[in-house]
Amino acid sequence: MGPRLATGFTVVEILAVVGVVAILMLLLVPSIQRSMRQASSTVCMHQLKEINRALQEYRLENCGWLPDVSDPATDGPVEARAAAWYGGLIPKYLGGLPSLACPADPLRSQITSKATLEEHPDPDHASSYGMNGLIRAAGLGHVDRFGPANPLETILVADLGPDVMIGDRVSRNGGWLAWDDGFHPGTAGLRDSWLTGRHFGHINVLTMGGAVQRVRTAEMLEERISNYYGDCSAGGCPLCAEYEVAHYSFAPERLFWWTGAIRRIE
């Protein structure tokens, strides 16, 4: 009988294959994760466009007003407040709660835990997105009457944090973006700040002109806010040029809390 030929793999060969597979996994997993996060950011931008469509439909049926914004000096409240600004959109204009949940939001499941806002345990905080708080504070919700000078550069809605639970609940300022929410580096303000960097250190921002763009926030989360920024003031920001109140500045991306005159800040 002749010599038998080995038909199996040796231990060294198996270890070599396992090593190659492990190296490939180490190379591929970060790429896959990045692709998934990029896809989440793309879905988020699409959702902001849908929110814009819903807001414009709401305005057409409510005499030009954005939801949950009133002007006591003229018309008074448009309608009774219902779970922040987005309460006026759901379900007639926007559909259900998933439309308010950013795919990259770590607290997404908290937002979509119930089918409707009426059933939600915390409807004032049931959104991954917030509206520009200055619009409400200054009574600027009638876009045709008090519209900004540069709508494409004026913030309307953006990603809203924080991305952690505050106690046993999501705490998101009733769905409003505060121009100064008391954030200071190295303090608890970092945890409670609405500003987030959930998209690779960026947020997605919808402007009053309907444009959606990504804005880098990683550095902003590490810097103290100021009451004046030269490039912000040059862009027509009344918070800089007129009121000099502390605020986050998005001027490097040509985005502003408002462009043009405002009548008051409550």
Image: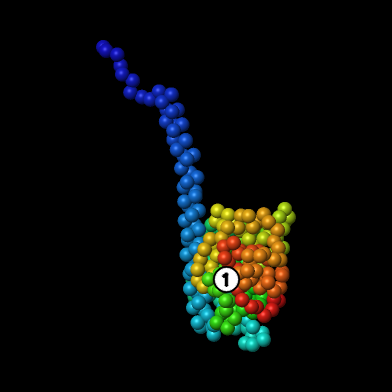
Q: Outermost residue, right direction?
A: 187
Q: Outermost residue, left direction?
A: 1
Residue at mark 1? 154
User: What residue is rendered at 69% in x and 76% in y?
Assistant: 265
Numbered-mark total? 1
Going by the numbered disc 1, the residue's amino acid type is Thr
Left or right: residue 234 compared with residue 17: right
Which of the two residues, 177 or 164, is positioned nearer the viewer here? 177
User: Residue 88 in the image: x percent, y percent?
Assistant: 56, 76
User: Residue 220 in the image: x percent, y percent?
Assistant: 64, 57
Q: Residues within 10 Å of mark 1 (few under 14, many from 20)?
A: many
227 up-or-down from 57: above or below: above
Tell me the quarter of the picture where residue 180 sits: bottom right
Q: Is residue 74 visible?
A: yes
Left or right: residue 5 compared with residue 219: left
User: What residue is rendered at 62% in x and 78% in y?
Assistant: 140
Which of the two residues, 12 or 35, is positioned nearer the viewer here? 35
Secondary structure of the residue carrying numbered label 1: loop
Q: Outermost residue, top direction?
A: 1
User: Residue 65 in the image: x percent, y percent?
Assistant: 57, 81
Classify the position of the C terminus by image quarter.
bottom right
User: Residue 197 in the image: x percent, y percent?
Assistant: 59, 56
